[in-house]
Amino acid sequence: MNPITEDMKDLLEAAGVGTFNKNSAGGWTVRVGSEQPAPPDASITLYDTGGPAPLYLFDGADRYYPRFQVRVRGDKNGYLSAYAKAEEVIAALARIAPQTINGTWYVGVWQQTGITHIGYDEERRPLFTINF
């Protein structure tokens, strides 16, 4: 079983929200576990944040409840475009139909928090988080 962030990264890329691990300026990059300094400034990073303990069932159909956080960093002084990208992330992930992604069956993805502005970094790039 993959970390949920790996599978959600693939969903974001398939939905056209960003390109995985792109290292050139222009467009949005999607990363897992580590936000890169730049380029590009515009990035989406997914972090595993745990979740409730799994429910282990005798028939082997165990239930897992992983949680993850998405952090959106915009271009310098790009508050509105970064907020819009956070909305795109929600549209791509929240309430997906039940499906298998990379061998793992997902019943769905539920948004746990609204878009939260957590400030600006040292380069005046806006930062937002969303928890799922």
Image (cartoon, rainbow, N blue to C red):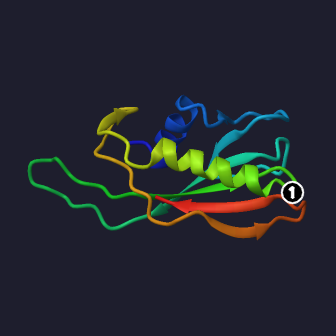
Q: What kind of residue is marked 1?
A: Asn
Residue 111: image x %, image y %?
A: 44, 58
Q: Which one is nearer the viewer's eye here, 20 or 80?
A: 80
Name the residue rendered at 89%, 65% in the picture. 122
If the image is split into quadrants, where does the N terminus sit?
top left
- For the residue pair 67 and 116, the one nearer the viewer reads as 116
The residue closer to the viewer here, 54 or 70, is 70
Q: Residue at x 50, y 45 (%)?
A: 91
Q: Position of residue 127 (x, y in %)?
A: 73, 61
Where is residue 10 drawn, in percent x and y? 52, 35
Q: Could you tell me which residue is drawn at 90 percent across and 60 percent down?
A: 123
Residue lying at the far right in this picture: please name it.
123
- Residue corresponding to mark 1: 77
- SS class of the residue under badge 1? loop
Q: Quadrant of residue 83?
A: bottom right
**Left or right position of 113 against 97:** right
Residue for point 21% across, 61% down: 55
Q: Is residue 25 left or right of residue 116?
A: right
Seen in the picture, residue 99 relative to 77 is either above or below; the reply is above
Can the viewer see residue 24?
Answer: yes
Q: Is residue 111 left or right of residue 100?
A: right
**Hey, which quadrant is residue 54 in on the image?**
bottom left
Callout 1: few (<14), some (14-19), or many (20+) C-alpha neighbours within 10 Å? few
Q: Number of numbered discs present? A: 1
List the single residue furthest toward the left: 59
Residue 66, position in %: x, y? Answer: 39, 57
